[in-house]
Amino acid sequence: MRMRTLFITLVVSFPAEVWAAEAHIPPVKGWMVTPFVVLLVAIAVVPFINRGWWDRYYPHVSLGLGFAVFSYYTMALDLRRMLETAVDYLSFIALIGSLFVAAGGIYLHTERHATPLVNTILLSIGAVISNLLGTTGASMLLIRPFIRMNRQRIRGFHVVFFIFVVSNIGGALTPIGDPPLFLGYLNGVPFHWTILQMWNVWLLALALVLALFWVLDTVSYRRWLGEGHRPVRGTTFDLKGTHNFVFLLIILAAVFTHTPLREIIMVCAAAAAYRFADQKALRANEFTFAPIKEVAILFAGIFATMVPALDYLALNADRLGIKTPGAFYWATGILSSFLDNAPTYLNLLSAAMGLHGLVLGNTAHIRSLIASHGAFLRAISAGAVFFGASTYIGNGPNFMVKSIAEHARVDCPSFFGYMVEYSIPVLIPVFTVVWLVFFRS
């Protein structure tokens, strides 16, 4: 059964169409992923070499590479495939942009000083909220208050761990939390299965990451105090723009409608949220459209150039040679770090079902997989959701959070710095422990 592209609002690592087994995939070759690789390298390396040049010319690089792939597909392979990708991209920007605008009109502030314990509690709460609003909704709502609470001593690692917890790992408990889980629900995975079968995996990963954050933040806090700084303490709480919560909920509810009504509702809600926003809240949030502009341009190129990579994966998923839940966990995770985790989830789920003579798209077969080989679905679900935190482009909220933080004058790590300083030394050991405990055998 051919299913149209469907996005889940609350959490977007990337939008993705639901690929059925009989969906048409053009005959792509390995060399066709070159523009995608070039764009990733450019995003990672060029700002480090010449930030001024990148800030001026990144639209030319991103849109140029994207247009090259778009043109080749359109003229030589499959126009329909690129039109579907264009719809995916528009849905993605409608979601990300509308949540960004609606949340930008909500000002949350407290004078309470953010100690390491307070920060850890805040991130824990954000992880729970991610399952209710989705990682995108939770990230857009909480990142600015989190930055303000830590303004006296904020470091890049605060933003990084916010991305780890709120923008990714936190959303593993419900189909609302992350797009792959929602697509699983659409393909027959019971709504309650996620929380019943993933809570212990979620809890272990979350506890380990939060513990590491607490240690790192404690060291940073003590060093800050040792330099002679003293925290400004207070108990006041300020909330402005509460009516924007209505527009936020409208946007989140719109995900359950269909294209183009979904995007129309989101755009109209965002326009209304901005038109009727509390101006004091906008000024207090230092709201501008610069972050969403940057994300829109970069992801236009990413969406177009990653199509050959996704198609190549779809055509060769049965040749990956993976046979165990642990292998599916790592394969799904590694691919989800750089590709859209939703189609990666579906392709690996299809491969796992094929190992047991089952077919994706058949609800009875999904239930049979859960009953007899549930570890495979747990492994694929964990890999798709958790590993989205591995890079800035692993999940939609990641880059948006980075952009908002940088516009708030927070010194965030570079693309490679994010991976080398944080995701590899922090997340890979945590994900390895998760593998050892739940998926090794």
Image: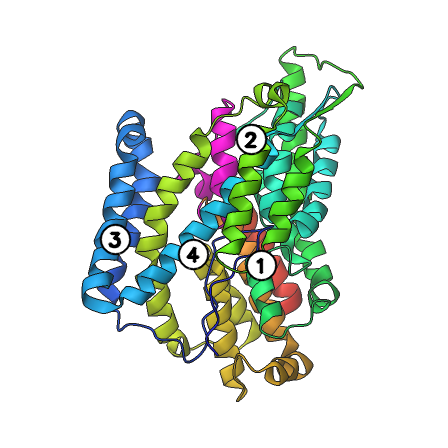
Q: Which circle's residue, 1 or 4, is located before the other in the chain?
A: 4
The residue at which mark 2 appears reads as 274
Do we see residue 270 in this rendering? yes
- Compare residues 14 and 23 and report the one nearer the observer: 23
Q: Quadrant of residue 186?
A: bottom right
Instruction: Provide the residue span drawn in magenta.
Output: 393-421
- Confirm whether the magenta stretch covers residue 419: yes
Q: CA distance from mark 4 to mark 3?
A: 19 Å
- Number of numbered discs visible in the structure rendering: 4
Q: Quadrant of the C terminus?
A: bottom right
Q: Which mark is residue 35?
A: 3
- Asked whether the residues under the numbered discs 3 and 2 touch, taking CB atoms below 8 Å apart as contact, a structural biologist would say no
Q: Quadrant of residue 145?
A: top right
Q: CA distance from mark 2 to mark 1?
A: 23 Å
Q: Which mark is residue 88?
A: 4
Q: Name the residue furthest bottom.
A: 357
Q: Quadrant of residue 296?
A: top left
Q: Residues within 10 Å of mark 3 (few under 14, many from 20)?
A: many
